[in-house]
Image (cartoon, grey):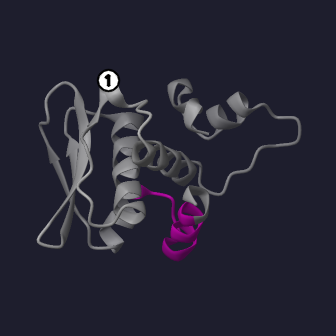
Amino acid sequence: MEILLSKRLIKTHGTNNPSRIASETNLVVLYEDLGKNTWGYYSCINRIPCIHINCRLDGFSATFALAHELGHHFLHPGVNTPFLRKSTLFSIEKIEREANRFALYLLIGEAQPEINETKCNFLKRCGIPEEFHVFY
């Protein structure tokens, strides 16, 4: 389900950039100080969806957090999800696993593994750091 949704969004928006997808779907994205452990969270109050991303994050972590929260928006509409914390990034909760997989597939985009390419090399080629490979 996560892979199909990510591919549909990429096709619809012509990009796998989570910031652009959020903007084009009129999602409010707020960058705010969420402390040392919280990466982000998704909320929907009075039917207004909002993604909160920790402004302390940079690089791939910030991009992944936004893609993860987009996953909650599209996979779990209207649900206020638990905070994505660095210490619980690898949560076994179903909705967290789904959002993690969605984020990874979105960020991989339309890339495909080459013949005989290992999973690790493929994901590295896509710019995915090793600690996130478990979601593929």
Q: Where is residue 73 in the image (x, y as percent from the top left)?
A: 34, 62
Q: Which residue sits at x=60%, y=57%?
A: 3
Question: Dot 1: within a 10 Å radius of its alpha carbon, few (fewer than 14), some, or many (20 or more) residues?
Answer: few
Q: Position of residue 12 (x, y in %)?
A: 52, 76
Task: Inspect the image, locate mark 1, and give the three-letter code of the amino acid beneath it.
Answer: Ser
Q: Which residue sits at x=22%, y=26%?
A: 37
Q: In this view, does 52 lie to the left or right of 75?
A: left
Say which quarter of the image contains residue 130: top right
Magenta region, mostly helix, strand or loop? helix
Quarter of the C terminus within the rendering: top right
User: Is residue 12 a member of the stretch shown in magenta?
Assistant: yes
Q: Is residue 7 left or right of residue 96?
A: right
Q: Position of residue 120 (x, y in %)?
A: 69, 28
Say which quarter of the image contains residue 32: top left
Q: Is residue 7 above or below residue 102?
A: below
Between 119 and 121, the one lying in front of the other is 119
Residue that badge 1 annotates: 87
Question: In this figure, what is the number of numbered marks?
Answer: 1
Q: Is residue 112 above or below residue 20?
A: above
Q: Which residue sits at x=45%, y=45%?
A: 94
Quarter of the N terminus within the rendering: bottom right
Say which quarter of the image contains residue 25: bottom left
Q: In this view, does 85 lie to the left or right of 32?
A: right
Q: Is residue 39 left or right of residue 17?
A: left
Farthest right residue in view: 115
Q: Give the range drawn in magenta.
A: 5-18
SS class, disc 1: helix
Between 30 and 95, the one lying in front of the other is 95
